[in-house]
Amino acid sequence: MNCCKEKFDDIVNSIKSAEIFNKKKEEIEVMEDKKCTNTLKWILIIVGAVTVVAAIAYVVYRYFTPDYLEDFEDDFEDDFEDDDDDDKKE
């Protein structure tokens, strides 16, 4: 009788050990998934920050850079108007 009880206790202990092992294994898998997700989150944050800095730099550049085309168009229109005035006089 004592032998059966010991075998039964051994079986119960092995089942408990297997359950604990499986739980630990599942916890490790969950932690690895979180680590992967966490890494992806940090990569996206860094890419977003770089994009924002680049956009701000572009806006500042566009704000401080003079628009030379506007001056060119004004000069061109003045020359064109002068030609029309000459045609009217003749």
Image: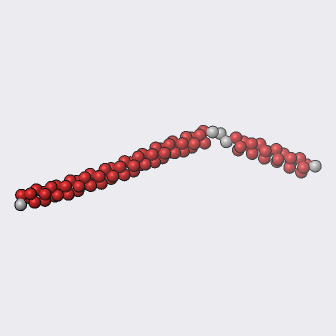
Residue at the spot 65% in from the left edge and 39% down from the top edge: 66
Residue at the left extreme? 1
Residue at the spot 33% in from the left edge and 52% down from the top edge: 29
Left or right placement of residue 56 versus residue 20 in this view: right
- Residue 23 position, x and y percent, is 26, 54
In this rendering, is residue 71 above or below 20?
A: above
Quadrant of residue 12 in the image?
A: bottom left
Observer-nearest of 12 and 69: 12
- Residue 19 position, x and y percent, is 23, 56
- Residue 70 position, x and y percent, is 70, 44
Residue at the spot 31% in from the left edge and 50% down from the top edge: 28
Quadrant of residue 72 in the image?
A: top right
- Residue 25 position, x and y percent, is 29, 52
Observer-nearest of 54 and 90: 54
Locate the N terminus and report the quarter of the image it occupies. Answer: bottom left
Left or right placement of residue 1 versus residue 89 in this view: left
Whether residue 16 is visible to the viewer of this picture, yes or no, is no
Left or right placement of residue 90 versus residue 70 in this view: right
Q: How many marks?
A: 0
Observer-nearest of 50 and 11: 11
- Protein image colouring: secondary structure
Observer-nearest of 8 and 78: 8
Residue at the spot 30% in from the left edge and 54% down from the top edge: 26
Whether residue 43 is visible to the viewer of this picture, yes or no, is yes
